[in-house]
Amino acid sequence: MSADFVLDTGALVALQRDPRRFIALVMLAREESRALRTSAPVVTEFLGGSSRRLRPAGQYVISRISSSDVTESLARRAAVLIQGAVDEGGRARPSAIDALVAAEAEATDAALVFDGDAADFRALSRASGALEIQELRGLL
């Protein structure tokens, strides 16, 4: 089985705004035998930040994606990834949620799919040494 796709908040927002794009990702994942997943804090950030008009679409997107809880070991790994990203210099300042998603993807050998600040995700990938990142627009 291929590696799953772990989606960050930015990717979910982009998919919420474009249902055809979301359907295309679901179909791609199905064709490649990949699951669509995210981390529980992303669910909070995504649904909490959804405008009233887009909330039904957000609920639909989340209903099609599994989410995982955050363990202490995953949180500690995310902290190490942030430290590595910041310590390398440059402008990268990944958020705790971005780092949790990166740690989740790293721990499960999944590909992190993002739509947002590429510098932050590249820095997290370098800090990891093993994290595969894919920009959403590169997939679809």
Image (tube, grey):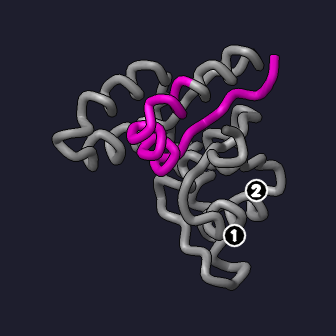
Q: Position of residue 129 (x, y in %)?
A: 83, 56
The percent coordinates of residue 89 (x first, y second) are 69, 84
Q: Position of residue 88 (x, y in %)?
A: 73, 79
In the image, 47: left or right of 125? left
What residue sits right under mark 1 in the picture?
84
Distance between the alpha carbons at the discs numbered 2 and 1: 8 Å
Residue at 40 percent of width and 37 percent of height: 16
Discs 2, 1 touching: Cβ within 8 Å:
yes
Residue type of the residue flagged with mark 1: Gly
SS for callout 1 = helix
Would you say 52 lies left or right of 76 here?
left
Q: Residue at x 16, y 41 (%)?
A: 52
- Residue at the spot x=56%, y=46% of the render? 101
Snapshot quadrant of residue 107: top right
Is 21 on the left or on the right of 127, as rendered?
left
The stretch of residues the image draws in magenta is 1-23
